[in-house]
């Protein structure tokens, strides 16, 4: 059995698997800004939109995660990448998020980006904050009451950043 | 002669006047991230998009400025507003930017937003930074090399924020 995930660009034939992961993640209402009720078509149109580079992570051929890279800003800010990562809950704890992030940093360099910025890392998502720090990201700002957490109400969010 | 600007929602009949202002502002390549070469249709589709509240400022019936309000994030972050402001260069120095900002804060409250965030205030745009501070915004983060300034190369940008 392989223990390392593999990565490839997502295709339209991956949409069922992507939606299973995305729906599960956003349903939590505790880590991503997308409304937990966002319809499948709207969410896939966003995650796989023409302005994104969308990937899947596979483990033994099964899709266990997905991530996307995009310009964080248009035009004169387009050298800064933005990214989002999601892992299937039943594949958690195996380092897939970390492996996706490491691969995405290489991929972002290859695509010509100079840095990467996360705009809204929910401050109570300690696992994510710890992982991004481990991957070289710094907290460069904290936005008060930026996120309506399903259980905790309004919580702050971090802007995180690293050079590539 | 009136000395105070008036505000109203923009309509499609304002597009020529809006484009004159927007084109002039983005052509500078020193304050906004939009590519200075962005075509008219693309820029108006953005500035007047269905996800925006777009306004014009008039002085003696002439359009001298424009601003837009929108959700800074979808879903669970949609209680934070984002805004952009542009003033015709030949109407500068008359407090139109400040009056637009003051009106936009009221309008954002009326629309139900709880706070307002600017994501990429170019650090070398001292006039804007001074004005936003005067209007109650704080710098809550600085993004290194976030903006490719036409004359200065890569310069940092601020994330600015205030409650409503």
Image (tube, coloured by chain):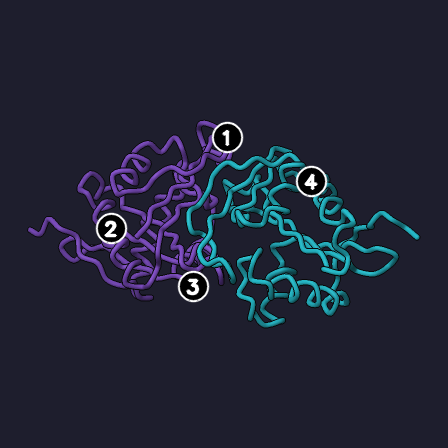
Chain colours: A cyan, B purple
User: Mark 3: few, some, or many residues within 10 Å (few <14, many ≥20)?
Assistant: few
Chain letter behind tag 3: B
Determine whether the residue tagged by mark 2 lies in a helix, strand or loop.
helix
Give percent across and percent down for residue B14. Answer: 29, 61
* Mark positioned earlier in the residue sequence (2 or 3): 3
4 or 1: mark nearer the eye: 4
Image mark for residue A105: 4
The residue at 33%/60% (across/down) is B54
Where is residue A145 drawn, in percent x and y?
42, 51
Residue bearing the label numbered 1: B154
**Which mark identifies residue B51?**
3
Badge 2 or badge 1: first in the primary sequence:
2
Residue B56: quadrant of the picture: bottom left
Quick one: label 4, few (<14), some, or many (20+) residues within 10 Å? many
Query: Which dot, 4 or 2, sits closer to the camera?
Result: 4
Look at the picture and state if B154 lies above or below B120.
Answer: above
Q: For the residue carrying disc 1, how many other residues have a C-alpha within 10 Å: few (<14), some (14-19), or many (20+)? A: some
| Closer mark to the observer between disc 4 and disc 3 | 4
Question: Residue A11 at what x, y percent from top left?
Answer: 75, 62
Distance CA(mark 3)–CA(mark 1): 30 Å
Measure the C-alpha gap from mark 4 to mark 1.
21 Å
């Amino acid at each position: 059995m392989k223990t390392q995930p593999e990565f490839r660009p997502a295709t339209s034939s991956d949409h069922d698997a992507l939606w299973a992961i995305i729906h599960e993640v956003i349903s939590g209402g505790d880590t991503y800004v997308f409304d937990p009720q966002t319809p499948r078509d709207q969410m896939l149109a966003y995650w796989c939109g023409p302005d994104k580079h969308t990937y899947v992570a596979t483990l033994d051929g099964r899709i266990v995660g997905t991530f996307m890279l995009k310009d964080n800003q248009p035009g004169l800010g387009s050298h800064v990448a933005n990214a989002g990562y999601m892992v299937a809950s039943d594949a958690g704890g195996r380092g897939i998020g970390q492996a996706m992030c490491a691969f995405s940093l290489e991929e972002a360099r290859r695509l010509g980006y100079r840095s990467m910025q996360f705009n809204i890392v929910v401050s109570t998502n300690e696992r994510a904050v710890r992982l991004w720090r481990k991957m070289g990201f710094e907290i460069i700002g904290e936005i008060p009451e930026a996120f309506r957490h399903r259980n905790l109400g309004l919580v702050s969010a971090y802007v995180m950043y690293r050079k590539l």
